[in-house]
Each structure stands twice: as structure tokens, then as C-alpha cells.
Image (cartoon, helix red, strand yellow):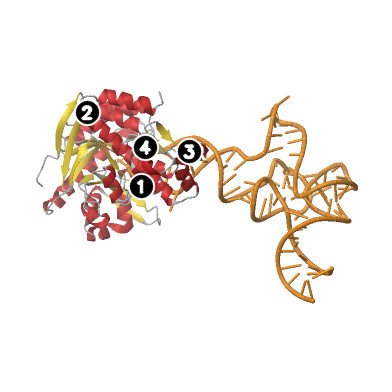
RNA sequence: GGUGGGGUUCCCGAGUGGUCAAAGGGAACAGACUGUAAAUCUGUCGGCGACGCCUUCGAAGGUUCAAAUCCUUCCCCCACCA
């Protein structure tokens, strides 16, 4: 495996940084928000939509794609890019989060995780080795190590166990990944994941272990799982100090706009979150003036756009009244329009953040954004 | 005109003497959602000075300690027959 540097730092403002990550399918600007395309598609969005709004990298999920349509099909179709025709970078998550969210139908051992499919109950086994094979077959540009995302709250002992297992598994991921990469033309970039729940000593330990693996990128996992915003910030601020500055640092599963701004202020480069898409499908969108429950009755006769300050093509054309009506009638177009807007909103937020960093005014950008967002 | 069935809280629809303000859906209203078991889930859903009271089950009377449930009359719907 030829080791290449994938991160280029372009500008810093305090701890905040502006950079670029380059992988097989191209580059993406950081800080970046990656829409989540669990089953090979960002729900309700087409590739054209995503390109249009400026998304440069999306996620795919090992667990979901392995179960359906099955790794063989995706591989035979030319990997994810060949399959879903998203020709920009893709990051695949390892299924570590599913170990957390599907804990009631899975069993964790040192060997790996035995789980039942949420589709049909069939039994499967994920080991770090198996996950690497799958992720290589899926063909993403960045693949995540198979980790154990510990639920919140967790005792120090439980969290420590998660840290140990995450490290053991990460080492096994690295071995298998190296082996698989030897025969590949464009091997993916394996990112490690730091765990440790809300315990600083464990975060330190986990970060040092993961960093010692010398991977091209590092992620902070196990946050935004139920802890308070203060705890999240504490852990993030603490953990990121242990992650190398010459590689991308990815905060997994985050978050709300205010969380992203907070994390960027500490130097996080990559984010992903289901909020813009999931919430859009359940009647909520993000706007410059704060979250809007467009499903609620006060939008019934509102001919204004979802966000009065948005220049996305949904806000240029459609009204709250119409989109609410579509939602209430379960017209899929309602979810499509709402999802488009919120995804655009997130991409637009990231554009604003990047530009502000370049112009050394991130702090005021953050302050102004939050003032308007919180209706102050 | 005859025979049979039926009218229940916004809608559909259970309930056939007390444990019924009345099951269950739907609609409506609100809340939740952070590496997507999520076009999902939760709550409210007659009124009120609310551990109690008032109004409600087509209408009006009646039986009973007690009626959405039984009886009488009336109004209206549906099906089939003529």
C-alpha cells in the first residue's frame, strides 16, 4: 500500500481550519458536510440534486448495503460509484453504529458482532476482517474501521471495554486492509475511530491508540449518542488535541448547525448526519431563522418559502403552504422538496463556514449565524 | 307500497342494561429525531372552576336504582321485492 497524504491545509484561523481532501474520485473542500446515503442513496435525493447543491462527498453504509442488495451485486456493478452513479467521493461507514443502534438483535464478542438482519432476522457475523472485505468491495474512497460505539450512558468500565475492543478491531482492520490493498489499483483510505464515551482518560487512551496506527484520517465516534451538548463539546475539545493536524479529523454523526459550528471552531474537518434528510421527512426543516416545523398548522396558508433567506431552488419556487399540504397528503414530493432544502441549507452553511475561515472571520460568522438562527 | 337492515363522539367503525366520555382505525393538533431498523415514533384528541361535575350515541317520550344498549311513536338512510 502506498501511503499518500490526502489532506491539504489551506488556511487556519486559530484552531479552525480550511482544507481539501483528495481521494480517488476527486477532492472535497473542508470543513465538509457529507449527506448520509445509507442504502446507496441520500433519501429522496438524486445525484443531480446533490451535485447541484454542492455536496462533494456522501456516505454509504456497510451494514445496509451488505444486507441489501448484497456486497456481490454492488461489487459486480462496479462498486458504489458504478452502482449509484455518484461519481464524486464516497465514504462508507463500517456498521459500527449499527452495532450500537441494533444492540438488541446483536451480540458482541472479541471476535466480532453476531447480528440478525433487521429485514428478515437472518443471522450474520461481522468481524473487522469481514468488514474490511465488504468495504473494499463496496469501493468507497474512505472506509471506516469497524468500531464499537458504546451507548450512553456507560460506566467507565463499559467505556474502557469499548476502547479496548475498538483498538483491537482497528489493528485487525489495518492488517486486512493492507493485505487487500496490495492487489488494488486505487485502494481506499482507512480511517480510525476514537471511542471513550465521556471519559477524558479513555478518550486520551483511545486517541493515542488509534493515532499510533498512522492512518490517513481519524474520526471521533461515540458522541451525539445522548450525552449533553456540554459533554459533547468537552470530549471533542479534549480528543481533537490528540489527533494529528496533517490529516482530516472527522466528527461522526454530528449534527445540528450549532454543533457543527462548535466543532469547526475546534478544527473538525468532516461531518455527517441524518438530521437534514430524516427531519425533512418528518415535517421539519432547517432554516436561517432556526428549525421550522413546516408540518404544523401555522404553515397551512403561508405562501412564503421554507426559508426567507435561502436561494435554493425549492425556496425560489415553492411555498410552505404547498409543501405542508404535500406532507399531509403523504405526497413523496413533499419529502423531496423539504429534503432538498435542508440538504442545501447544510451545504450552504458549510460554504459560509469555509469562506469565513478563509477571510479570518469565522468567529463573527458563527456569532451572526447563531443570532439569526436563535431568533435573537 | 312490501320485506329486511341501519342511523354511535370530525370521518369510518366496535359496543346491545351498570366496569362507557364510549374499543380500534383515520383525520386533526402537538412533540421527538445527531456515523438512518425512521415517508418513523410518542402524546393529545366532548366541555369544564377536572381525584369531581356537565353534555353526547337520529328525535321525542317511556320502563329501570341505572339506557348508546329495552319499549313506543316519529324522522332519515340502504338493500331487495313490487
Measured along the vertical axis of the image, is residue A143 above or below residue A354?
below
The residue to which callout 3 is attached is A302
Residue A341 in the image, given as x and y percentages of width and height = 36, 41
Q: How far apart, in angstroms, are the residues tagged by discs 4 and 2?
A: 34 Å
The residue to which callout 4 is attached is A151
Using the image, name the chain to which the residue with label 3 belongs: A
Q: How far apart, in angstroms, are the residues tagged by discs 2 and 1?
A: 44 Å
Q: Are marks 4 and 1 in contact (CB under 8 Å)?
A: no
First along the sequence among labels 2 and 3: 3
Q: Are marks 4 and 2 on the same chain?
A: yes
Q: Are marks 4 and 1 on the same chain?
A: yes
Crowdedness near tag 4: few (<14), some (14–19) or many (≥20) residues, C-alpha within 10 Å: many
Using the image, name the chain to which the residue with label 4 belongs: A
First along the sequence among labels 2 and 1: 1
Q: Are marks 2 and 3 in contact (CB under 8 Å)?
A: no
Q: Secondary structure at mark 3?
A: loop
Q: How far apart, in angstroms, are the residues tagged by discs 3 and 1?
A: 50 Å
Name the residue nearer the viewer: A22 or A143: A22
Residue A90: give its label. Answer: none
Q: How far apart, in angstroms, are the residues tagged by discs 2 and 3?
A: 36 Å
The residue to which callout 1 is attached is A107
First along the sequence among labels 4 and 3: 4
Residue B55 in the image, given as x and y percentages of width and height = 77, 39
Q: Secondary structure at mark 4?
A: loop
The residue to which callout 2 is attached is A357
First along the sequence among labels 4 and 2: 4
Amino acid at each position: 500500500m502506498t501511503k499518500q497524504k490526502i489532506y491539504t491545509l489551506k488556511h487556519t484561523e486559530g484552531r479552525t481550519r480550511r482544507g481539501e481532501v483528495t481521494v480517488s474520485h476527486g477532492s472535497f473542500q473542508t470543513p465538509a458536510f457529507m449527506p448520509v446515503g445509507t442504502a446507496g442513496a441520500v433519501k429522496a435525493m438524486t445525484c443531480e440534486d446533490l451535485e447541484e447543491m454542492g455536496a462533494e462527498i456522501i456516505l454509504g453504509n456497510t451494514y445496509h448495503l451488505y444486507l441489501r442488495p448484497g456486497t456481490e451485486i454492488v461489487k459486480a456493478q462496479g462498486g458504489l460509484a458504478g452502482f449509484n452513479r455518484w461519481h464524486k467521493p464516497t465514504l462508507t461507514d463500517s456498521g459500527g453504529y449499527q452495532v450500537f443502534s441494533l444492540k438488541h438483535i446483536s451480540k458482541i464478542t472479541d471476535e466480532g458482532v453476531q447480528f440478525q438482519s433487521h429485514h428478515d432476522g437472518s443471522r450474520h457475523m461481522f468481524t473487522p476482517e469481514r468488514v474490511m472485505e465488504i468495504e473494499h468491495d463496496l469501493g468507497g474512497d474512505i472506509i471506516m474501521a469497524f468500531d464499537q460505539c458504546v451507548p450512553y450512558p456507560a460506566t467507565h468500565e463499559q467505556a474502557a471495554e469499548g476502547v479496548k475492543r475498538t483498538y483491537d478491531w482497528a489493528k485487525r482492520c489495518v492488517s486486512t486492509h493492507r493485505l487487500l490493498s496490495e492487489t488494488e489499483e486505487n485502494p481506499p483510505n482507512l480511517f480510525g475511530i476514537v471511542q471513550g464515551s465521556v471519559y477524558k482518560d479513555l478518550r486520551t487512551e483511545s486517541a493515542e491508540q488509534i493515532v499510533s496506527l498512522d492512518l490517513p484520517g481519524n474520526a471521533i465516534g461515540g458522541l451525539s449518542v445522548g450525552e449533553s451538548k456540554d459533554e459533547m463539546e468537552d470530549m471533542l475539545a479534549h480528543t481533537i488535541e490528540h489527533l494529528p493536524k496533517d490529516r482530516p479529523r472527522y466528527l461522526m454523526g454530528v449534527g445540528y448547525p450549532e454543533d457543527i459550528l462548535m466543532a469547526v471552531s475546534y478544527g473538525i474537518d468532516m461531518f455527517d448526519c441524518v438530521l437534514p434528510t430524516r427531519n425533512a421527512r418528518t415535517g421539519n426543516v432547517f432554516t436561517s431563522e432556526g428549525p421550522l416545523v413546516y408540518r404544523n398548522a401555522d404553515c397551512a396558508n403561508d405562501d412564503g418559502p421554507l426559508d426567507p433567506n435561502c436561494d435554493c431552488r425549492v425556496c425560489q419556487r415553492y411555498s410552505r403552504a404547498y409543501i405542508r399540504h404535500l406532507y399531509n397528503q403523504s405526497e413523496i414530493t413533499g419529502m423531496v422538496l423539504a429534503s432538498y432544502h435542508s440538504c442545501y441549507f447544510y451545504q450552504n452553511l458549510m460554504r459560509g463556514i469555509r469562506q469565513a475561515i478563509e477571510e479570518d472571520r469565522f468567529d463573527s460568522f458563527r456569532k451572526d449565524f447563531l443570532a439569526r438562527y436563535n431568533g435573537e
